[in-house]
Image (cartoon, rainbow, N blue to C red):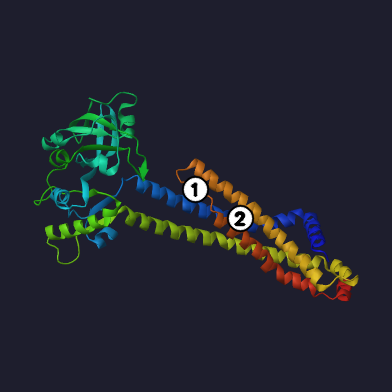
Amino acid sequence: MDIVESIKMASTTLMANKLRSSLTMLGIIIGNASVIAMVGIGQGAQKLASEQFEALGPNVLFVIPGSREAQQTTVDFPKTLVWEDAKAIATQVPAVAEVAPQINLRYLITYRNRNSNSLVIGTTTEFPSVRSFNIAKGRFFNDIDIKRNNQVAILGSEVVEKLFGYQDPIGQSVRIKDVSFEVIGVMEPKGTFLGNNQDDTVFIPLSTMANRLRGRTSPYGVQISWIAISARNRDSISAAQFQIENLLRRRHKIVGEDDFGVQTQEDILQIVNTVTGALTIMLAAIAAISLVVGGIGVMNIMLVSVRERTQEIGLRKAVGARKEDILIQFMIEAIILSAAGGIIGTAIGVSGVLLVGAFSPLKAGISPIAILVAVGVSGGIGLFFGVVPARQAAKLDPIVALRSA
């Protein structure tokens, strides 16, 4: 029999049972849509993480207090870094361009009858250039502000919106922990980073934070939350990391495990990509189970179809149809069901990815590989699960088939 004629007959048979054919394709449709959507969303999460880490600033390293075990098992890192460590890195590490130590604490910010529970960062003049923050209005504090413990503040854009609305905040006074601060600048919007709103932030001099708000907490110096460092260029990041580690080991007199960690953008991004990649694979694998379930549904329906069409099969074989003709027709029907379900599922999955990208911060993208794999697997499933009912139909004896009809 001509293959084109077999396709026409298979299509006519499937169209004669539209509801059953649609329900048979449903598992394939859901499987394809789920796989494509999960892979697209996972890749979007990786792109978003990459963009956010690039926004941290060029060639940035972070010195984090606490041993490696403490960093992995505690939320509040041990306070093993002091301001003097940052000063030593700035003056003694050749591969370092700028150093910005910081103390991060959350306080209630008030202006008249308005409040904002925001993150307050005590830092130094190098912070904007190290972390790629830009001033939208006014100025950032300078070395004189730090030396004199001046009570000046730079507000994030969201803090300005909460406290001042459309009023110009420059020159106004806000209170942080019952201490008055003059607003001297406003930051440009920065967005969120790993779930943290960087615009809901207030910046004050590190010395003012230590002396006026938090107070002295260690006899060894001003304890800090961590140190942000920019290397001179991308090629000097590894050298900067090595030199910083050696310097801090000497300063802290370490003979065993380090009580700090130095991490680069690439290190952190690699960890995030590993996690998101594993989650993407897991979600895609779970979604792929529905493809197998859909394939089993195709096989079940085709087996039922063989039983219902026993007389037709007997008549065709009685007038000269070969086993191969019957086999090909039923396999074509199974492949059409799976391929059609794969195409519809692909369209739904791609639409879902585009909607996620349009209405969420995820940079969701469409993976051509995921589409090819999903459609190829769905077609292969139709071929694989269609073999059993097709062979069963091909093996029917025409006389027995006609008698049983």
Q: Is residue 120 visible?
A: no
User: Residues at badges 2 and 1 in contact (C-beta under 8 Å)?
Assistant: no
> What percent of the width, then of the height, locates residue 301?
72, 63
What residue is pinned by disc 1? 364
- Name which quarter of the figure residue 403 lies in: bottom right
Give how far apart the Cα atoms at labels 2 and 1 are: 19 Å
Q: Viewer-nearest of labels 2 and 1?
A: 1
Give the side of residue 41 with respect to residue 101, left or right: right
Q: Residue furthest left?
A: 219
What residue is pinned by disc 2? 30
Q: Nearer the viewer, residue 195 or 343?
A: 343
Counting labels gives 2
Tell me what residue is drawn at x 21 percent, y 41 percent.
126
Tell me what residue is drawn at x 61 percent, y 61 percent.
291
Give the side of residue 224 with respect to residue 276, left or right: left
Give the residue type at disc 1. Ala
